[in-house]
Amino acid sequence: MADAAGRYVGGTLDAGRLHAVFCASDVFCEAARAPGFVAREIEGGMVIPVFSSLEALAGFAAQDALVRFATRRTGWFSARGQDLLDLLPDGFDLLLDPGADHAIRLRAGATVRRLMVGPTPVRPALR
C-alpha cells in the first residue's frame, strides 16, 4: 500500500488503481478505548489515520506517545481497506500514513463507497 501511495504522489499511478490497491490491502488503525475509530481533526475536517503497515503505525504512535499514554490508547487493529470503507462514518475521511512523504487523504463519499483521492499537505499537522 505504501508503494502504491508513493507512486500516486509521484504521478505514476492513477486514482482508480490506488483505490483498487487500497481496497485489497490490509491497513492498520489505532484502537479506541471502546469499539470504533480514533479520529483526528486536521485542516479540512475529521480524519481517521490509517497505516500501510504495523511499522508505520508504531512510528506514528512513538511520535504521539504522550497523548497515547494520557488516553490509555495502546492497541491497534487491522482490516481490509474495502471493509474499512464500508464501516467509515459519514463526514470522515481516511489519512494514509500521516507524516510520511507519501501521506494522502482518502475521501469517501457519503453514499458511494469509492475513494476520491484529494490533495493534502505531505506532512499534515494532527491534533
Image (spheres, rainbow, N blue to C red):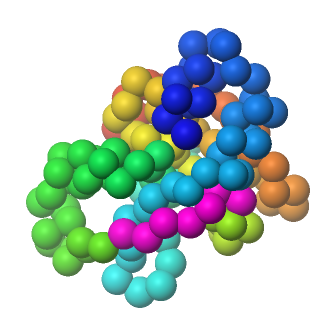
- In this rendering, the answer to whether 11 lies above or below 110 is above
User: Residue 42 in the image: x percent, y percent?
Assistant: 45, 45
Horizontal side, residue 108 vs residue 55: left or right: right
Query: Relative to the observer, which residue lies in front, 94 or 19?
Result: 19
Question: Residue at left 52%, top 24%?
Answer: 6
Verify whether residue 81 appears in magenta: yes
Horizontal side, residue 88 vs residue 9: left or right: right
Residue ranking furthest to the top: 11
User: Residue 111 in the image: x percent, y percent?
Assistant: 87, 61
- In this rendering, the answer to whether 117 lies above or below 11 is below
Query: Relative to the observer, which residue lies in front, 92 or 8?
Result: 8
Q: Give the magenta part as a residue range.
A: 76-82
User: Residue 118 in the image: x percent, y percent?
Assistant: 67, 31
Question: Residue at left 52%, top 29%?
Answer: 3
Residue ranking furthest to the bottom: 34
User: Which image quarter holds the N terminus?
Assistant: top right
Verify whether residue 51 appears in magenta: no
Would residue 85 be visible to someone looking at this image?
A: no
- In this rendering, the answer to whether 103 lies above or below 96 is above
Q: Main secondary structure of the magenta part?
A: strand
Question: Residue at left 52%, top 55%?
Answer: 27
- In this rendering, the answer to whether 13 lies above or below 115 is above
Horizontal side, residue 39 vs residue 4: left or right: left
Q: Quadrant of residue 12?
A: top right
Count up the numbered dots: 0
